[in-house]
Image: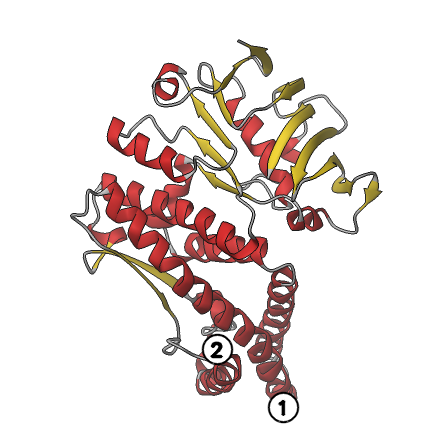
Amino acid sequence: MKINRAEIENYRNIEHICVDFNEINIIYGENAQGKTNLLEALYLFTGAKSFRGASDGELIRFSADFARMKADFVNKNREQSAEIIIKGKRSASLNGIKKTSPSALGDEIKAVIFSPSHLYMIKEGPAGRRKFTDGALCQLKSNYRGVLREYNRCLLQRNVLLKDLQQNTQLYDLLYIWNRNLARAGAKIIYQRERYINALLPFAKDIYAGLSGGSETLGLKIKGAFDYSGISAADAEGLLIKELEKNQAADMAARATTAGPHRDDLEITVNSKSARNFGSQGQQRSCVLALKLAEASLLKEMTGEEPIALLDDVMSELDEKRQDYILNHIKDGQVFITCCDKNTVLRLKKGKTVKIEGGKAVED
């Protein structure tokens, strides 16, 4: 997997950029010049939304009517081209053929992104950790986004019903239907998340051990309403139905569904202690790096393609040993690294350098 060229127009502070890329690409410059914007634009070609949580409208350059991104890339020895246009809503085409959804590009272009903002995975609540797991699964399984949409639709309908029951108790029998609809979709999510984390853990443990010099052990476990260990989708559905029925009185009082995969958490531990509650800054950063690099390793194992690695300001707070360890784990794939001083990376590996100034690219 390799992006050979990208052209970006009217994207955030970028008026127009057209750049050819190599295997190692170092994007450098002062702060607030557009380095992260370039990485963010490349990440959109995976079919995902902005990793910074921005809406599509926020991605269009101020005073412009649209944003456009085009990428020429190679996947499975085949040259291809993808285009994304943001005008009102985002649309995408592949090899000149319009796709029904921009997410369809994820079947062809896969990438792993690390940004300092991803420390929210450790520091904040469960939503960020669920987002990490679901985002990784969306790249691995093309139908997983549909499963998430179905679950969220059922969850919304059940929550609306719980509120309506306050005024009309005759609707109570409808809970039976929505309990089963929600459990059917939720069981698929539980099953896929559990399988993914079990597959990810060996890679993450090995990488974290390397980052910590073998002195610490990383642990991962999904925490839900019941024990997910080794669970089948059928068993998860039955147990989730029981949980929903058990919680019906509490749900009616709260006017919301209090159990299900939308409330699950990914427990991340270092030496069996919560990384969120007890981890140091260095340990928390190493946990996120280990998860992201493990995600790339697992993607390669399951798809046969090395994903693109997008590393935003990843090197600035790491010593030389950890910098070298990170690059050694992504040496076979294409890498994009942003930094203020290109020499912090060039001393480790030779690569193409692109300087960003005021949203414009100046190649060295």
Residue 166 shows up from this direction: no
The answer to which of 7 and 89 lies nearer the viewer is 7
| Res 264 → quadrant | bottom left
Q: Residue at x 21, y 43 (%)?
A: 212
Query: Which structural element holds mark 2?
Result: helix
To which residue does mark 1 refer? Answer: 173
Instruction: Name the side, left or right, on which 250 lies relative to 37.
Output: left
Residue 81 vertical position relative to residue 150 in the rendered view, above or below? above
| Res 97 → quadrant | top right
What count of labels does the image hold?
2
Instruction: Name the side, left or right, on which 85 lies relative to 286.
Output: right
| Res 165 → quadrant | bottom right
Measured from the top left, where is residue 185 in percent x and y? 59, 74
Distance from disc 2 to disc 1, alpha carbons, whole Å, reads 15 Å
Label located before the other in sequence (2 or 1): 1
Measured from the top left, where is residue 287 in percent x and y? 31, 47
Q: Quadrant of the N terminus?
A: top right
The answer to which of 267 and 177 lies nearer the viewer is 267
Q: Residues within 10 Å of mark 2 (few under 14, many from 20)?
A: some
Residue 213 vertical position relative to residue 304 in the rendered view, above or below? above
To which residue does mark 2 refer? Answer: 251
Measured from the top left, where is residue 247 in percent x and y? 44, 82
- Which amino acid is tagged 2? Asp
- Which amino acid is tagged 1? Asp
The answer to which of 304 and 246 lies nearer the viewer is 304
Query: Which structural element holds mark 1?
Result: helix
Q: Residue at x 56, y 11 (%)?
A: 363
Measured from the top left, where is residue 19 in percent x and y? 63, 20
Instruction: Name the side, left or right, on which 355 lies relative to 97.
Output: left
| Outermost left residue | 215
